[in-house]
Amino acid sequence: LVPSRVNPGLFYALPQSPQLFKQLLMISGYDRYMQLARCFRDEDLRGNRQPEFTQIDLELSFTEPEEIYKLTEGLMVKLFEETISVKVETPFQRMTYQESMENYGSDAPDIRFDLKLKDISDIASECELRVFKQVVDKGGIVKAICVPGGADFSRKDLDDLTEFAQIYGAKGMAWIKRNQDGWQSPIGKFFTSEQKEALEERVGLNVGDLVLFCADNTKVVHDALGNLRKEIALRRGLINNSEYRFVWVTDFPLFEYSETEKSFTSSHHPFTMPDIDDLEKYGEQDPGKIRSRAYDVVLNGVEIGGGSIRIHREDIQNKVFRLLKLTDEEIESKFGFLMKALSYGAPPHGGIALGFDRIMMFLLKTDSIRDVIAFPKTQKAGCLMTDAPSAVETEQLDELHIRVKASALQTE
């Protein structure tokens, strides 16, 4: 938030993206837009995040996802060939959000290696292992990863992997080694020979392989095994660092349920066009099942861009706001200008925002976004050059009609 000196008590907001402005351009009659946009987001920082970053922002009128895909793929082909002499294969692979989560445990899958997740909930529910049966009975799932040649993992290796999975919420991790004589596992006795045969076929288990299991609710299983597959790939040297594998992830859910707020929030943003059939079918009864016309482009397990077809009809936009539990007053105060613009008639439009800095990370072969930004912020969002954020004079606060709470001034 940025306080206004000439409008005491009122604030500006630094843009997270130019989303609504570029949509208004399309509504006003412009058919194409491109900008190198500086964006600001107050998020937890990590290796590929900064509070201030640049995106290659595109918007088109009368467009469909196919046109966005071709534009983006063409840009990546030219960019990678002319800068680092890497030939990028097109068209990029595509998968739905559902397929990505089911197979990779992530909506940003790294497809340079296999190690796919396999759902064995039906087999687990019939075995005699109580923890598996209880999880499935409560609506959870049991999934497995087969690690080719993984039977050589030591007990310490398995303990380390279990501790790693617990970082992401797993309560533990069962395992099976397939030797010449059969299964070596603490849980082998709970499976019949028929169940063992079915499980081996499901996960592709061969002699010398290792299978790792996680049983919990869907989110925990996907978080734990999705990150575990990447950790195993690193430890086993399964990743070719000279390979660049792009993939489109499509059909994201329109909403996601927030446990903290006990309500649905937008998965991308509330201006994303829903699947109309889903909107009519599920509506208020089951909004979590409504798919959107959103898409992400992912490179080697890192999201480098995201976009969607936008809502161009006032009635649909109003329905989405209603599903987010916004009142008439909130809609008018926050988005009245957009609703008025849509009421005049708007062309179908869509676009994408590509992370300029993240793309530069790949071109320069670095794992830290701070290596490609001049004067980057630290892990605590501080500037080492200017020592910002810093305290200001009382006179400056008075001029802006701001008072800082005493508790905020206390240092640890």
Image (cartoon, helix red, strand yellow):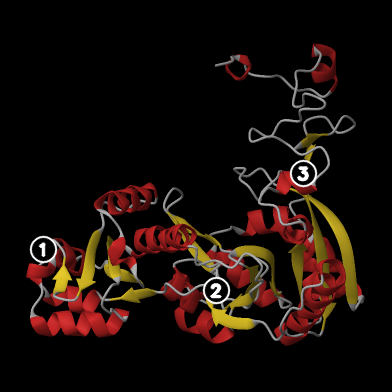
Looking at the image, tell me whether mark 3 or mark 2 is earlier in sequence order.
Answer: 3
| In front: label 3 or label 2 | 2
Q: Where on the picture, by quarter, is residue 412?
A: top right
Instruction: Give the labeled residue for mark 2.
Output: 111
> x, y (%) of residue 52?
76, 45
Image height of 296 relative to 326, above or below: below
The residue identified by callout 1 is 130
Q: CA distance from mark 2 to mark 1?
A: 34 Å
- Measuring 55% from the left and 68% from the top, which residue is drawn there? 110
Please state if 269 lies on the left or on the right of 32 as rendered.
Answer: left
What is the x, y in percent for residue 325? 53, 59
Residue name at image x 36 percent, y 58 percent? 220
Say left or right for 36 vs 334. Answer: right
Q: Residue at x 62, y 45 (%)?
A: 43
Q: Amino acid at mark 1?
A: Arg
Q: Spatial distance from mark 3 to mark 1, Cα to Cα?
A: 53 Å
Mark 3: which amino acid?
Answer: Ala
Residue 379 is situated, as x and y percent measured from the top left of the image, at 64, 36
Q: Quadrant of residue 252?
A: bottom right
53 is higher (above) or lower (below) than 398: below
Decide which of tag 2 and tag 1 comes sooner along the chain: 2
Give residue 13's mark.
3
Label 2 neighbour load within 10 Å: few <14, some 14-19, many 20+: some
Q: Measured along the vertical axis of the image, is residue 405 above or below residue 62? A: above
